[in-house]
Structures are given as structure tokens and as C-alpha cells.
Amino acid sequence: MKDWSTRLIHPDTHPPKGFRSLVTPVHRGSTVVFPGTAEVSDDWRNRDRYTYGLYGTPTTRELAGRIAELEGGEHTFITPGGQAAIALIGFAFTRAGDHALFPDSAYGPTRQYAEEVLARFGVEVETYAPGLGAGIEALVRPNTRLVWCESPGSVTMEVQDVPAIAQAAHRRGAVVALDNTYAAGVYFDAFAHGVDVTMQALTKYVGGHSDLLLGSVTARTEAEYEALGHMHARLGLGASPDDCYLALRGMQTLAVRLAALERSTLHVARWLAEHAAVETVLHPALPGCPGHEIWKRDFTGSTSVFSIVLAEGATRQAVETFVDALRLFQLGYSWGGVTSLAVPWFDLRRTHGPSYGGRLVRLNVGLEHVDDLTADLAQAFRRAGLPAAAG
């Protein structure tokens, strides 16, 4: 008989087989045990078997497969966060001497990554007006390798003409990547509109409860799959199977949450659009938002995040007082969870569009009752000395 210390590691007792559950199990592990030397491999391309925990466990592989299925892509890679997904795309498709285009309205850390990291490694980064559409072809050079899109844009919510951008970029041989987090990968069919690579911060709608950090990158074809997979492995972008489990759980309620969030958000946005304290509501589904007609053409729904510009003359102090006076809207970054959020943007950096004079506040509507949310906004307007009634 084996010594008791050995039996702690190599037990003779095993649970019975055949257990089935509605819940995806959490498979944790770094080392993968092979049946024989002929099967030993550390190639990340092994889609039908496992070689090392960094390249996926059954839990992470299931999440990747389900995201790819949802988006209609060739394959999905899971990353430890949305920012890691952004970095993976940049490193996979650019190198020193290349030129890359990013919209002026891109997520702040996306732009910082491009201008501070890609540029450091010899990639020339240029920003473009998000509403440029087919006109972007004038900016595409022989060495332009990557054209980034984000639609709607972060904070200012511009909707881009992605099909026109993709056509122009493809005529010059550039790869088109899209941050599709706003649409949760379902309200905008990126691949049908010409995109080559998509990413999401699964932290937002797929996770849905503000308790995980994950990202995804989905490839349209085998060529993008190869480029992404090689870089994913070399950067060591392994994701926690526990977080992947939470994302898989979140996917089960994604449809009902998105529907509820859309209804509540439109109710609150329309209420704000009629309020005297608000100059502009930047919500893609409302007329007046840049690119609204494109949103109607290309999107099948809207989600929970949008921005408001407070009335002309609102001072920084008034904006701060308004946000601090909110009780149900918590002050914090991110979005897509069940809790409503608000955050002011005083130093909005824009080269090709308005910065709104420090009067912009981004809102995320959660699952609270809409009457309670509008009452919270109304009392905060009063506390800030802003007009307190609908216009």
C-alpha cells in the first residue's frame, strides 16, 4: 500500500461518473496530463484537446465558443479584461513602421494604449473624426495596417458608418477592428457589416453584475485567428476560469437584462430630453445624437449607457453638486451592470468634435424602477441649482 502522504496526491478513491448538471463546471488547472508521450504538445492551436491551462480549460473554451457563436465569428480568444483584448488586437496586427487609425471618440484607455504603447514600438497612430465614413479612405496609406472603430463612441456616443469605413479600409488592405461592447455583440452584427475582428469587455453586459473583469476578441476568418492566437499565447493572456464561469452564468440572462435595460434607459433618456436642466441627450436611439440615422439602419437595439450635456451656463461646481447629490446613481466607471451609475467628464479630449465645455455627464441606467431614477435626477438638479422641471 502507498504511504499516506502519497495517497494525498494519488488517491485510490474517485467519485462516480455520470453527474450531469445545468451549470457549467469550473475547471481550474495549469498542468494538463497527457495519456502518452505521443500526445505531448504545447501548441495553442489544439482546438479539440488540451495542452496547458494558459491555452484554455473546458470552462474558458466553452465561454470562447459561445461568444464566437453569438457573434458569428471563426473563433474567440478570452482575455483577463477588456483592455487586454484591445492590446491583443493592436499587437497582433501592427508592427514597427505601420500606420494605424483610431477614432477621436474611442474609449480613453484605447487611445492611450495606441498613443503611448503602439507608438513607443514604432507604430504611427493617427486619430480621425468618427463621422468620417467613406471619407476615411483619404487617410489610409500604403502602410496602414489597422483601422479601429468604436460605435457608438465612448462618452460622446457617435455612431460610425462601419460598413463604409470597412469598404474603404479593405480596398487598401487594412484590417478593421471594432469595439462592440456597447452592442454586447448582439445588437450590431459586426461581421455582416464588414468588420474583421471584434472585441468586447465582457466585464460589461455579458458579466452583467459588476463583479468580474474579462475581455473577448473574435476573429472573422482563419487568417485573423492565426494572428490573434499566436500573439495571445506569446503574451500569456490567460483568463481565470472562475471569472469565465461567472460570464457563462451571465450569458443565460443576457437577453432579458438587455431588454429591460433598453426599456428603462429609453424612458430615462426621453425624460431627460424634455428637462430644462439638460441641453443635449447623447443617446444613439434619439434624434440629434451624431449618427442616429446610421444607428437606425445598422443596429437592432440600444443598451444602457448614454450621456447628457447640462444646460448652457452650468458651472463645474454645479456639475459636481449634481453628480454628488445623486443617491441611486452611484459615482463610478464602467457600465452594463444592475446598478445605475454617473460620472462627469470635465477634461474630455476631442480633436475632431465638441468637448461640451465640461458639462457632460455619462449615465448608466441599471435595473432600478424608472420612477425612482427620474426622481433621483430631479432632486439632484434642484440641489445643483439647475432648472428643476421639464422644459
Image (tube, rainbow, N blue to C red):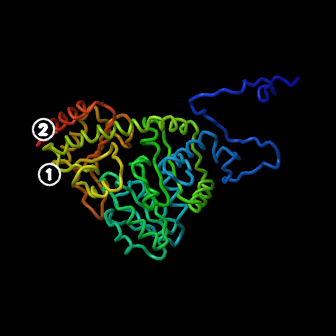
- Tell how many labels: 2
Disc 2 target residue: 388
**Mark drawn on residue 340:** none
Callout 1, which amino acid?
Glu
Among the 4 quarters of the image, the one containing residue 233: bottom right
Q: Residue at x 34, y 47 (%)?
A: 301
Q: Are marks 2 and 1 in contact (CB under 8 Å)?
A: no
Q: Circle 2: is it few (<14), some (14-19), or many (20+) Cα within 10 Å?
A: some
Q: Quadrant of the N terminus?
A: top right
Q: Quadrant of the C terminus?
A: top left
Q: Residue at x 64, y 46 (%)?
A: 54
Q: Circle 1: is it few (<14), some (14-19), or many (20+) Cα within 10 Å?
A: few
Q: Position of residue 298 (x, y in %)?
A: 35, 55
Disc 1 target residue: 312
Q: Is residue 207 above or below residue 42?
A: above
Callout 2, which amino acid?
Ala
Q: Residue at x 45, y 73 (%)?
A: 171
The secondary element bearing badge 1 is classed as: loop
Q: Nearer the viewer, residue 147 or 301?
A: 301
Q: Residue at x 21, y 43 (%)?
A: 270
Q: Position of residue 378 (x, y in %)?
A: 18, 35
State which tag comes first along the sequence, 2 or 1. 1
Q: Is residue 175 left or right of residue 343?
A: right
